[in-house]
Image (cartoon, rainbow, N blue to C red):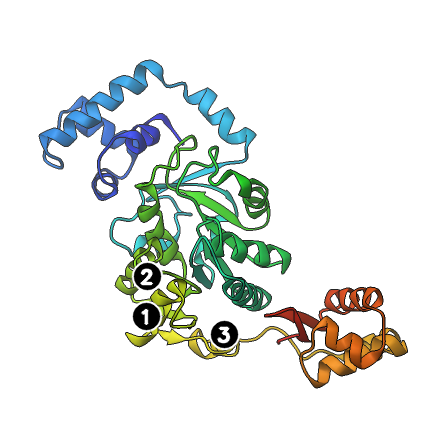
């Protein structure tokens, strides 16, 4: 980043105007020469010109580029603007593309195959369970998981992606040195280490409510498809859906009971033509996934399963999904020992927990 990049970034005009100037003048410094030194008004109106001039004067007196660059370096924050070689290709094709991006992590992930997962901030246990399964399935198949880091479905999709050694991509509505919400701080840092966390806003930008609808267009653009897990009929989630439809992305939704307000948005999306996710295998058909997982080779765990207690638990779950009480009643094993066995089988990726605390063979 140079002084002129920052000057354009901070000027309060639309991204489209900034990008048009870069396309015409090629560099930020040439934009400065054309507008400020030469007073060229062929590209912008007088009001926009005044904003560029005012911002330039303020920054010229107050902005310390060296100090600012040291802050970015300290927190491992990178900057890319439209026209740079590593500006994400997926963002080049949308209307109102961001002039620039601040990011931590691997910016190249934005051009990998990704699916966006969105939903309510107050998910039901059903929604949480479905979100976990979807995020895990995408992650183990090397599909990037994109979301916005908000409470509820957003951060849960990131959390499961991290646990599954996947490729999490988080788009914030605040600056990268002003994380929001604060309680997700540890996940945001981990996403920056293992995936990519980004924002089009300057690093200290507060989480203004007007930022989030803008942020949603980037979530939709990065994802090659969009999954809505739980959403009310009128919610911020539907703004993201609208962007995805405008960009020609495949939309899928998780159905829910007709009596649940948080399922109303999903159910109506399905009614209006969105794909329905009625089982995990639907992900493969809708988004054309090529599975990178293989069938569980139970022979690899022969020593573990040769333990009679462990084999009893495994055999019961293999026959049918079972909860703790059923396993205890049918095997005669103590609840304490059952929990230990279940923990071990989960760690070996043989079984997984499902809705209602039932345990089943791992979905692959």
Q: Residue at x 31, y 71 (%)?
A: 268
Residue lying at the far top of the rendered structure = 61
Q: Nearer the viewer, residue 320 or 94?
A: 320
Residue under numbered circle 2: 241
Q: Are marks 2 and 1 in contact (CB under 8 Å)?
A: yes
Q: Residue at x 57, y 42 (%)?
A: 189
Of marks 2 and 3, the one in the foreground: 2
Residue under numbered circle 1: 269
Of marks 2 and 1, the one in the foreground: 1
Q: Is residue 152 left or right of residue 38?
A: right
Task: Tell me the quarter of the picture where residue 272 sits.
Answer: bottom left
Residue under numbered circle 3: 289
Q: Measure the alpha-carbon separation of dots 2 and 1.
A: 9 Å
Of marks 3 and 1, the one in the foreground: 1
Q: Is residue 122 left or right of residue 267?
A: right
Q: Measure the alpha-carbon separation of dots 3 and 1.
A: 22 Å
Q: Nearer the viewer, residue 337 or 169?
A: 337
């Amino acid at each position: 980043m140079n002084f002129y990049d920052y000057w354009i970034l901070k000027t309060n005009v639309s991204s489209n105007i900034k990008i048009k100037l870069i396309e015409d003048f090629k560099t930020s410094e040439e934009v400065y020469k054309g507008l400020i030194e030469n007073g060229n008004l062929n590209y912008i109106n007088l009001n926009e010109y005044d904003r560029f001039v005012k911002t330039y004067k303020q920054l010229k007196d107050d902005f310390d580029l060296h100090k600012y660059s040291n802050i970015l370096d300290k927190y491992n924050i990178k900057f890319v603007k439209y026209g740079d070689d590593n500006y994400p290709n997926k963002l080049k094709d949308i209307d109102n593309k961001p002039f620039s991006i601040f990011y931590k992590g691997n910016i190249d992930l934005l051009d990998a195959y990704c699916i966006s997962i969105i939903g309510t901030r107050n998910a039901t246990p059903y929604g949480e369970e479905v979100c976990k399964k979807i995020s895990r399935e995408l992650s183990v198949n090397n599909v990037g998981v994109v979301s916005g880091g908000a409470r509820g479905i957003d951060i849960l999709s990131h959390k499961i992606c991290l646990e599954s050694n996947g490729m999490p991509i988080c788009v914030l509505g605040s600056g990268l040195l002003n994380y929001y919400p604060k309680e997700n701080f540890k996940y945001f840092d981990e996403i920056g280490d293992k995936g990519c966390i980004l924002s089009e806003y300057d690093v200290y930008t507060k989480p203004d409510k007007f930022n989030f609808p803008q942020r949603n267009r980037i979530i939709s653009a990065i994802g090659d498809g969009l999954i809505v897990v739980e959403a009310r009929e009128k919610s911020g989630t539907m703004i993201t859906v609208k962007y995805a439809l405008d960009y020609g992305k495949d939309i899928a939704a998780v159905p829910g009971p007709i009596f649940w307000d948080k399922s109303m948005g999903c159910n109506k999306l399905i009614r209006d033509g969105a794909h329905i996710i009625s089982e995990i295998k639907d992900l493969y058909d809708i988004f054309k996934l090529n599975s990178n997982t293989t069938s569980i080779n139970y022979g690899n765990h022969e020593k573990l399963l040769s333990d009679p207690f462990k084999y009893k638990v495994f055999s019961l779950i293999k026959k049918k999904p079972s909860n703790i009480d059923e396993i205890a009643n049918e095997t005669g094993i103590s609840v304490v020992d059952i929990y230990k066995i279940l923990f071990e089988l989960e760690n070996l990726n043989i079984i997984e927990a499902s809705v209602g605390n039932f345990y089943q063979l791992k979905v692959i």
